Image (cartoon, helix red, strand yellow):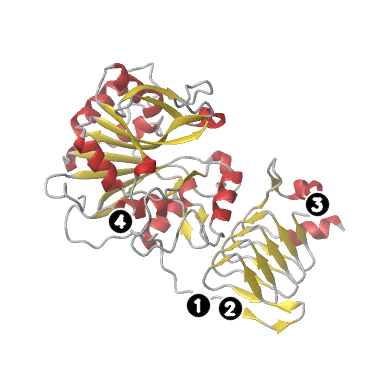
Amino acid sequence: MVDNGFAMRLRVLGIILAGGKGTRLYPLTKERAKPAVPFGGKYRIVDFVLSNFINSGLHSIYVLTQFRSQSLLQHLSEGWQMGGIMKNQFIIPVPAQMRSVGETWYQGTADAIHQNINLIEQAEPHVVAIFGADHIYRMNIAHMIEFHENLNAACTIAAIPVEKKHAHEFGVIEAGEDNRILNFHEKNPDAPTIPGQPDMVYASMGNYLFETRMLLRALREDAEDENSSHDFGRDILPKLVQEQQPIYAYDFQTNRIPGEAPGETYWRDVGTIEAYWEANMDLRAVKPPLNLYNRQWPLRSTSYPDPPAKFTFDEQNRRGEAIDSIVAGGCILSGGKVKNSILARGVKVHTGAEVEDSVILDNCDIGRRAKIRRAILDKNVRIPEDWTIGYDLERDKKLYHVTETGIVVVEGNRSPVDVATLMV
């Protein structure tokens, strides 16, 4: 239910699409689904959309999973079990059921919903909120629902301006002055720009509200169309626009989060290693664009019994310290220095080691005098003494994954010790 003025008469069912491969985030998605990728020291990407739902008063949520889902399922089990006695309070992961005629994996976002259409029929909601699980943002969904209901919309799409050079990555919306959608262009590099802003397009965030009966009809018609790719952006939304259904764009920039000033919105599509790294780096600022410390809109996640972070030694060239960084519980900076970085749970940084502009995931161990710069270390990586990463990119390319912008990604559970031995 929505905890606002519509709560007494609206039943809202949340469906979170969490089954994507996340191939552009490789190797972080080598062994896990994209929504299960760690972020910000103690969270997973999926925690953002789940927190948005719960904070907005929406407690009936199905999470559709598919590829490499074990890590995600474990996280949901450990951190998101709801103990409410009301039948409309649940967060339930739904593995791919293969309910299609050919018993296939999900063929597109619309097919994922259609294969689970029985969940909608059983719940009999007034509104279905279909959201993606792979973005970093905070959103008061109740505000979007209020917008949707006031317009008596059949469908509402959350939208945000992005640079035109990214048009090929998004569905682009053409909307009138009343926010009614006039056209929808799916991942078209030549999509029209925002009037008066030739370098910007109005991009879909992949978050939709649907009037239930209209959604069910659209899903069934799309499933019977052999020429459809069974995707919301490519098929269902353009068709609904052509039918002149009342479809509206909700301007995410108008969203209001309790505890924050109007207009303070943040949304990042962390679809690439660069975007993921940059979003983590955004957290380091004195006044970060994404505020994790707003108690009126908490970011929820799994709670671990970690001890506090510890900084040891106060000697010249042997001082444990972190500057403009986030350090999670269980970390020990034993004479090492961390600057402009994110350290997840249980990281150890030993004497003389330096970590700068990096994201270090759980339980990594940085040996004495090692130097790490502009890197992402996945879980359980052990860096030997005097080893360097990010200082010789040509050498790093032979050992690790290096992006075009020079960010080095070291796969989890892999130790550079063996590689170092081979290179001697």
Q: Residue at x 30, y 26 (%)?
A: 180
Q: Secondary structure at mark 3?
A: loop
Q: Secondary structure at mark 1?
A: loop
- Going from N to C along the chain, the mark reached first, 4 or 3, is 4
Mark linked to residue 55? 4
Mark linked to residue 1? none
Disc 4 crowd rating (10 Å Cα; few below 14, some 14-19, many 20+) is many
The three-letter code of the residue at mark 3 reads: Asp
Q: Mark 1 or mark 2, which is nearer to you? A: 2
The three-letter code of the residue at mark 4 reads: Asn
* Disc 1 + disc 3, Cβ < 8 Å: no
Residue under numbered circle 1: 307
The three-letter code of the residue at mark 2 reads: Lys
In the picture shown, does residue 403 fall above or below 79?
Answer: above
Q: Mark 1 or mark 4, which is nearer to you? A: 4
Residue at the farthest front position? 196
Question: Mark 4 and mark 3: span between their CA atoms?
Answer: 45 Å
* Disc 1 + disc 4, Cβ < 8 Å: no
Mark linked to residue 392? 3
In the picture shown, does residue 223 fall above or below 207?
Answer: above
Q: Mark 2 or mark 4, which is nearer to you? A: 4
The three-letter code of the residue at mark 1 reads: Pro
Choose top left, top right, bottom left or bottom right for residue 175.
top left
* Disc 2 + disc 3, Cβ < 8 Å: no
Question: Mark 1 and mark 3: span between their CA atoms?
Answer: 35 Å
The location of residue 72, given as percent across then percent down, is 43, 52
- Going from N to C along the chain, the mark reached first, 2 or 4, is 4
Disc 3 crowd rating (10 Å Cα; few below 14, some 14-19, many 20+) is few
Residue under numbered circle 2: 310
- Going from N to C along the chain, the mark reached first, 1 or 4, is 4
Q: Secondary structure at mark 4?
A: helix
Q: Mark 4 or mark 3, which is nearer to you? A: 4
